[in-house]
Image: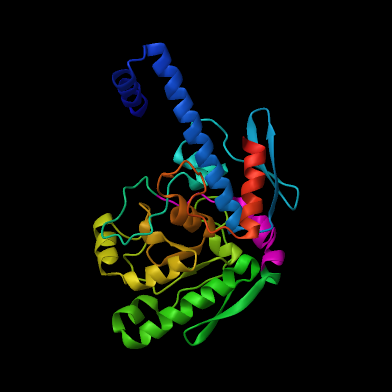
């Protein structure tokens, strides 16, 4: 439908014939695709600094090369079901749904789940390939009156510490916030997502579940119950965690309202690339320090 609308507009506005219109559509879509690809790759590089060392183009496929010499494909270029994206994700699959940073009042549609697709090859390189490696990277973070293990790599534990300090201060003044926050349900737990062979983000020590309510999770509750829970949930907690690069499971159609997950690539893409660039600069709005300038130069040099 989108292509048809563009096609008709080009003919109407420019007086071009159908063949020229089709060519122009292809050019527009190719430019949009390349812009999105560059933004996605920059989001990954900014989110996991030092872990992406090169970009390679082979047989029209684009790969990120990690410092562990892994090749991670940007786009498989095939139509996938949601389940296939979960089980065999590309970078494009992970970032195609933009995580909303605005407050929400209603549960998203069932097929809107930004962040439920996870790039396991990268997560393993950053946080640990095995249970033993992951556990060697865990440090204790104070959450209320207890310490909870969280992964120290890539500033995950530091980000949780900052978020918890801020929400804990608010909780001292607000029963509502305190009730959403405590008792904390858990952080690190080396386990698989129920009914799958995919590791839970808790297995990497990058997720925290706050106070549990029986209406929090799509498998425990109806959408009506989940909606009631979301409507009463503290927006202050959500804002603070998002400020510290956590996404919230309350913004998924498959809702998981007690769940916060450290996913800086989702937050970075939303923060800087949720709107179309206005001046033709694909990285417009990104803070340009020397490291980020090097990322941009590498991306432009490989993908022009």
Q: How far from the left and from the top, in percent, is residue 155? A: 60, 69
Residue 123 lies in magenta, yes or no? yes
Q: Where does the magenta region start and end?
A: 113-134
> Horizontally, is 68 left or right of 195 in the view?
right
> Horizontally, is 54 left or right of 249 in the view?
right
Q: How far from the left and from the top, in percent, is residue 88? A: 57, 41
The answer to whether residue 183 of the structure is visible from this angle is no
Q: Of 34 and 202, which appears nearest the observer?
A: 34
For residue 149, which quarter of the picture? Answer: bottom right
Q: Is residue 76 above or below residue 292?
A: above
Q: How far from the left and from the top, in percent, is residue 17? A: 36, 11
> Horizontally, is 165 left or right of 108 in the view?
right
Q: Is residue 149 above or below residue 107?
A: below
Residue positioned 67% across, 38% down in the render: 302
The answer to whether residue 29 of the structure is visible from this angle is yes
Q: Is residue 108 above or below residue 173?
A: above
Residue positioned 57% across, 37% down in the render: 75
């Amino acid at each position: 439908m989108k292509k048809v609308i563009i096609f008709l507009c080009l003919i109407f506005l420019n007086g071009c014939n159908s063949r020229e219109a089709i060519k122009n559509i292809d050019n527009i879509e190719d430019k949009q695709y390349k812009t999105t690809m560059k933004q996605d790759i920059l989001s990954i590089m900014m989110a996991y600094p030092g872990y992406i060392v090169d970009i390679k183009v082979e047989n029209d496929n684009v790969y990120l090369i990690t410092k562990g010499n892994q090749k991670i494909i940007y786009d498989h270029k095939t139509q996938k079901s949601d389940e296939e994206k979960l089980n065999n994700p590309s970078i494009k699959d992970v970032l195609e749904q933009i995580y909303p940073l605005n407050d929400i009042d209603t549960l998203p549609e069932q097929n809107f789940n930004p962040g439920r697709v996870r790039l396991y090859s990268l997560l393993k390189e950053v946080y640990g390939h095995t249970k033993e490696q992951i556990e060697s990277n865990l440090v204790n973070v104070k959450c209320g009156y207890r310490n909870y293990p969280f992964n120290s790599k890539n500033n995950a534990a530091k980000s949780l510490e900052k978020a918890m300090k801020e929400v804990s201060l608010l909780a001292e003044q607000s029963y509502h916030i305190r009730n959403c926050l405590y008792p904390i349900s858990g952080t690190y737990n080396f386990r698989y997502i129920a009914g799958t062979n995919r590791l839970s983000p808790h297995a990497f020590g990058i997720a925290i579940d706050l106070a549990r309510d029986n209406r929090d999770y799509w498998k425990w509750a109806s959408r009506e119950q989940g909606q009631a829970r979301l409507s009463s949930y503290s927006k202050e907690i959500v804002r603070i965690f998002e400020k510290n690069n956590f996404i919230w499971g309350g913004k998924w159609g498959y809702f998981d309202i007690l769940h916060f997950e450290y996913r800086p690539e989702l937050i970075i893409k939303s923060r800087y690339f949720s709107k179309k660039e206005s001046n033709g600069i694909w990285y417009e709005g990104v803070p340009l320090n020397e490291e980020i300038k090097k990322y941009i130069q590498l991306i432009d040099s490989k993908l022009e």
